[in-house]
Image: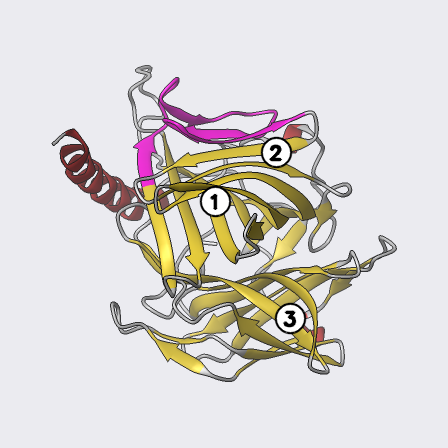
Amino acid sequence: MIRPTRHVLNRWAGLALALLLIVSAQAADFAPVLEGRQPVFPEDTGAHPDYRTEWWYITGWLTDDAGIERGFQVTFFRVGTGIGADNPSRFAPRQLILAHAAIADPVTGHLIHAERAERALEPLSGAATGHTHAWIGDWDLMLEDETYRTRIDADDFALDLTLTPAGPPVLNGRNGFSQKTPAPANASHYYSRPQLAVQGRLRLADAERTVNGRAWLDHEWSSEILPETAQGWDWIGINLHDGGSLMAFQMRQRDGSPLWAGGTFRQANGRIRILTPAQVRFNPLRRWQSPRTGADYPVEWEIEIDGRRFALRPLMDDQELDGRRSTGAVYWEGASRLIEDEIEIGRGYLEMTGYWQRQTGL
């Protein structure tokens, strides 16, 4: 009886924290994102509590010892509430730590996911400054000696993975200043770690499997909420088979038309091209409607990058993540293949927000 009781308590705790986030985060003063502040490593791999919102976002593909391929996601969010800044108590809810984890398993045909939400309170939960370390209980993500490790233990699955970068961080936008709308105030500090070599263990359906694969980490922090005209975004992070990488996104207006776009194309030789809004176009193709929320997602896309046309196709259609017990959002986060001239040239993830309800945060 212990586990069901904890599950119910955690569910209500998550709902309360999500409500606190929505009500309070807009009322506080947070550090602005300013162009010219170039990230410094390894210090900027850690948390930035003066900013409103921050996340460490890992997505990737895993192959187990039987040859079965699956997608996975591990995300830790840090959110400043604007509450308790003058309260000396360590129990004041100044920061929230939220986490999502998921497995995209074609065997089941749907996403298997879990979530957690807690106030930052060491040693139970927190996000360290100066180096990557975010945790809630026995869920954690840490960077040690240029190698990431993440451990997730949920009811339906568990992950214990090491992720080794293939090169230095890739700065997105203008030296890490990533503009999200025509107004420069709507921006984030943003870098990526593509081509992470993954090794570890996956527990699924009470069986442990050895896995290896390739992953992508995004670390982003910001303070502004999106303008009223914005509905959400579509984003891809693709590890190319030639060793390069492609990040591209579009912000959508409420009528579905593009508000802003951008991206970063890293060639196999390490040369980086920053993509302008005119060089990125997302054209929706086939759609899928969630039987749970009714949200209608374009799960296949034609994506134009500076004159080149790609097709993006999902590992499976049902990769919707219901995060209403933690972040309060429902979004589609799925393993996808990038195709050019009917040849697969890369694998990664597609994220789509604002199809269930309007997304307000960056």
Any magenta on residue 117? yes
Alpha carbons under labels 1 and 2: distance apart: 12 Å
Q: Quadrant of residue 346?
A: bottom right
Residue 171 disc label: none
Position of 2 relative to 315 (above/below): above
Tag 3 near tag 2, CB within 8 Å? no
Q: Which residue is mark 2?
A: 148
- Amino acid type, callout 2: Tyr
In the rendered view, does 139 fall on the left or right side of 1?
Answer: right
Q: Are marks 1 and 3 in contact (CB under 8 Å)?
A: no
User: Which amino acid does the dot numbered 3 rest on?
Assistant: Leu
- Image vertical order of residue 216 relative to residue 334, above or below: above
Residue in the picture at 13% in, 34% down = 5
Residue 277: name its quadrant: bottom right
User: In this picture, which residue range is highlighted in magenta?
Assistant: 116-144
Q: Residue 340 placed where, x, y %? A: 71, 78
Of the residues under marks 1 and 3, which one precedes in the sequence?
A: 1
| 114 left or right, relative to 72 | left
Q: Which residue is mark 3?
A: 338
Q: CA distance from mark 3 to mark 2?
A: 26 Å
Residue 205 appears in the rendering: yes
Dot 3, crowdedness within 10 Å: few (<14), some or many (≥20)? many
Distance between the alpha carbons at the discs numbered 1 and 3: 21 Å
Q: Which residue is mark 1?
A: 74
Residue at x-position 41% and y-position 50%: 102
| On-image quarter of the N terminus | top left
Rendered image quadrant of residue 295: bottom left
Q: Nearer the viewer, residue 313 or 186?
A: 313
